[in-house]
Amino acid sequence: MIYLEQFSYLLASVLFILGLKLLGSAKTARKGNQFAMFGMALAIVITLIVSGIAGPTQIIIGMVVGGLIGGIVAKRIEMTSMPQMVALFNGFGGIASTLVAYSEYMRFDGAETMDINVTVVLSLFIGTVTLTGSLIAFAKLQGIMRGAPMVLPMHQILNFILMIAAVVFGVLNVMEPAIPLWPILIIVVAAIFGVTFVIPIGGADMPVVIALLNSYSGLAASATGFVLSNNVLIIAGALVGASGLILTQLMCDAMNRSLFNVLFGAVGTDDSTGESAGPAGEQKTVTRYTSEDAAMIMDTVQSVIIVPGYGLAVAQAQHVLHEMTQLLIARGIDVKYAIHPVAGRMPGHMNVLLAEANVPYDALYEMDDINDDFQNTDVALIIGANDVVNPAARTKKDSPLYGMPILNVDYARTVMFVKRSMGAGFAGEANPLFFDDKTMMVFGDAKAVITGLVRALKKD
Amino acid sequence: MESLIVSIYVFTLAVFIGFELITKVPPLLHTPLMSGSNAISGITVVGALLAANASNWGLSTVLGIFAIAFAMINVIGGFMVTDRMLGMFKKAKKAEKGA
């Protein structure tokens, strides 16, 4: 029986690995997800069979209740709310690990070796930090909490003390596992640390935090695997941990910030769309254009690159944008989308939002693949984005944006901004491109402006 | 101690495989990757099932049941939403015919 169990776990691990491999291409991704699903089903079924626990109703109830909640959320969730959902689910993964570790601890009879105690401490700590950190991230993304960084007095010292306390209680627990106070204290300290860890991070840096917490939820699962000496937990958790770490690094690179700066820099404002109102560039004037003016320009062009930002998603303008794209394509205009890695509120978010609006994925281009095309493009149409196209990032050494990789929209023959206001972006850096002669500013809600454009394009 | 060493071996190698695989996932698919890996981290449900299986009822069993429920939210919710998302990704020709 033990061979059947272990062999099944091995097969499940292989299915997870193959699943992630297939996720490497849009063509096979769906199949990859199904592979992972099979792996999970196999691991669950074999656990139920081998441990002879298919019977007890409490287990069935737990599975059905959790499954139903998960299923309903998955069916109903709006694509714009994906970051919140992933944040919350990360937290659930964390609490599951904490509960399993504590449950194991309660079953201890004094015969446990030191390494089991060490892994229980790790599992309790990582699981609980993941839980409370994720809840804060969720609250910030959902708008329950303000997105602005919250820095307590002596914040870093507090974090440091919490870390020391966790280590001390951990060591005490390993030495005296019979005293029930230590695990409780570890959980309490970890819970506070999860909160103090995420509250100083600004709303616009949430993509990094979600990716990092994603990694933690994997490590929590791995830690539980260490407690139970169960390899499928260790492998699956390690894969997720690695995935989260890579995404974290990619997000940091895309903002030209170090992880340290994101976590401890307390950068950001209370801005949820990347377009805070600022007094930027009051001295200079810009010419205001209308949707009709924009439509007239479109009569004469051959190529357009659209740069969508989160403002597009806030205005729910993806669908009408796709309609506009269809009209342009019908006129023989070449239309592409340029996606900056931090467009949206989590890694890859903008791609999903556009895919939902039926934009084919081969029209979506990554920054590095499209940046050389701007110079041969008639119109760069920027909708609800600012920092990711701000040329100050290339030249202005004292700018907070300096060094951040940007989309080279300023190389296009005409630059069109659809924006709500003149405001600077989240970084507070004025965009010199607004005042350029080849720039057209069309102010207004993205949906209203694009709808106007569509109407004007249909007229002629 | 021996089982801990084996665990560390397995963990380390799995992290390397993870790095190799994930660096090949294009940014296009990063959101489904996150929700999908979320579901995979729901593997904790296996541990939860074992924890809930105590022969005598107690707090330990109750915690196990809650752990099962939370992990199952991850598993079912994560896989389903990933499938839903990946179903939206279409290539150009099909999408144009449909429109």
Image (spheres, grey):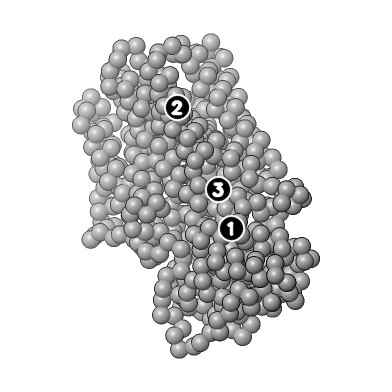
Classify mark 1: helix, strand or loop: helix
First in sequence: mark 2 vs mark 3? 3
Which residue is label 3 attached to?
Answer: B31
Residue at coordinates 23% horizontally, 37% vertically from top-left? Answer: A185
**Residue A91 makes an appearance in the image:** yes
Q: Is residue A367 above or below residue A101?
A: below
Q: Position of residue A127 (x, y in %)?
A: 37, 37
Which residue is label 1 attached to?
Answer: A318
Left or right: A73 in relation to A270: right
Q: Chain of mark 2?
A: B
Left or right: A348 in relation to A69: right
Q: Chain of mark 3?
A: B
Which residue is label 2 attached to?
Answer: B45
Quadrant of residue A269 within the rendered picture: bottom left
Does the residue at mark 2 contact the one at mark 3 (Cβ under 8 Å)?
no
Q: Amino acid at mark 1?
A: Gln
The CA span between labels 2 and 3 is: 23 Å
Q: Amino acid at mark 2?
A: Val
Q: Position of residue B29 (x, y in %)?
A: 61, 48
Residue at coordinates 53% horizontally, 58% vertically from top-left? Answer: A316
Classify mark 2: helix, strand or loop: helix
Outermost residue on the front side: it is A459
The CA span between labels 1 and 3 is: 17 Å
Left or right: A440 in relation to A129: right
Residue at coordinates 49% horizontally, 43% vertically from top-left? Answer: A77
